[in-house]
Image: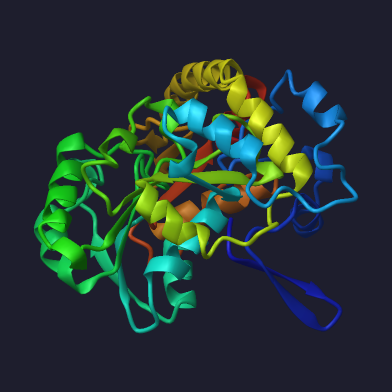
Amino acid sequence: MTDAARRTGTTQVYTWEPSNQAIAARYGVRPEDVVRFDTNTSPAEPAGLAGALAGPFDPSLNEYPDSEYAELTAAAAAYTGVDPGEIVVGAGADEVLDIIAKTFLPAAGAAIVPIPTYGMYGVLTSQRAARAIAVPRRGTDGAFGLDLDRLLPLLAEAQVVWLAVPNNPTGADEPEANLLALLDAAAALGPQAPAIVVDEAYHEFTGRTAIPLRDRYPHLIVVRTLSKAFALPGIRIGYAVAARATIARLERVRPPGSVSTVSATIGAAALRAPATAVENVRRLVEERSRFAAALTAAGWTPHPSVTNFLLVRIGSHEQAEEAAERLLHRGLVPRTFGPANPLRGHLRLTVRSAAENARLVEAIGA
């Protein structure tokens, strides 16, 4: 579920995703029995960060955060193998994407959005009063890859290209040859080249990255998050990696204190101890295989995935909606797609713990 609204008295309040309490009230289940298969988060908190949580914090909590986020920036730079001057941090990858939109996407401009993909790209584009150029991806037979024949001729019209690698919500990776072809075509436009934003939210699940290409392609911006492999969506830490000249432009737009001292401290500690993320990815990849096999045995059809979620073909749009309602009445929350979405007839399911995944599989046949 996403893009939801709840009612408070006579007022309808917009929310990106309904809370566990709202879902429990609507479907008559206990809040503690609600399991989020819709948010692509990890089933457990990361271990080993107790020291960072305990403090002391520098600066102390009665002062504003370090506006340069020197410790967090240094940790992200060391983790990615770049210079700290090639990093800009934000309150989650979503704020980093917002900073990019504010920097590169003018009102009446345009952004290329290969669809289906992460919904925030369209939201950020519309917030800038810019035009979203929707370019359909190749279908199932093409593993939802970029349709370069459609996309490349449109580059000259755009100031930004939003590109998730691996892609959300399909779970598919993008062939390196496609990315290089896109970067080369953009570079050929010279100073008019659009910013190519490669959102690597699920990088740790593949180990592949576009970061080494930043020197060759100055319009490339790679975005990362601590929400997925690092299992820390609650602290809201994201960062971008790009050539220094590009980062300098982003720095002029970045808010001076949007990341709390607590979040910056925890985020730096996590980046300095990436073994926790590596182990989390290993567990989730193993469980993903078991979950996909169980879903297949239950009669659903998961597409291949390199992430911590599965895109599952149910049937018609109506069948997918009915399946989602059955799950929701049991406190199991899938990601659904509207009737105009190219993924109608599918559900997206986060890979959670073995017990939670087994509960969902059991509910399919209930």
- Quadrant location, the C terminus: top right
Of residues 248 and 225, the one drawn nearer to the viewer in this rendering: 248
**Residue at the right extreme, as displayed:** 62
Say whether residue 359 is visible.
no
- Which color scheme is applied? rainbow
At x 81%, y 22%, the residue is 51
Residue 157: quadrant of the picture:
bottom left
Left or right: 181 with respect to 353? left
Name the residue rendered at 50%, 27% in the picture.
78
Q: Quadrant of residue 57?
A: top right
Q: In the image, is 355 to the left or to the right of 121?
A: right
The total of numbered circles placed on residues is 0
Provide residue 254's location: percent of width, then percent of height. Answer: 56, 60
The residue located at (52%, 18%) in the rendering is 278
Residue 249, visible in the rendered structure: yes
- Image quarter (top left, top right, bottom left or bottom right) of the N terminus: bottom right
The image quadrant of residue 306 is top left
Image coordinates of residue 94 in percent, x first then y, are: 54, 55
For this view, does 10 lie left or right of residue 165?
Answer: right
Position of 289 relative to 117 (above/below): above
- Residue visible at 14% across and 61% down? 190
Closer to us: 27 or 167: 167
Q: Position of residue 39 (x, y in %)?
A: 59, 45
| Residue 220 place in picture, x, y as percent | 30, 50
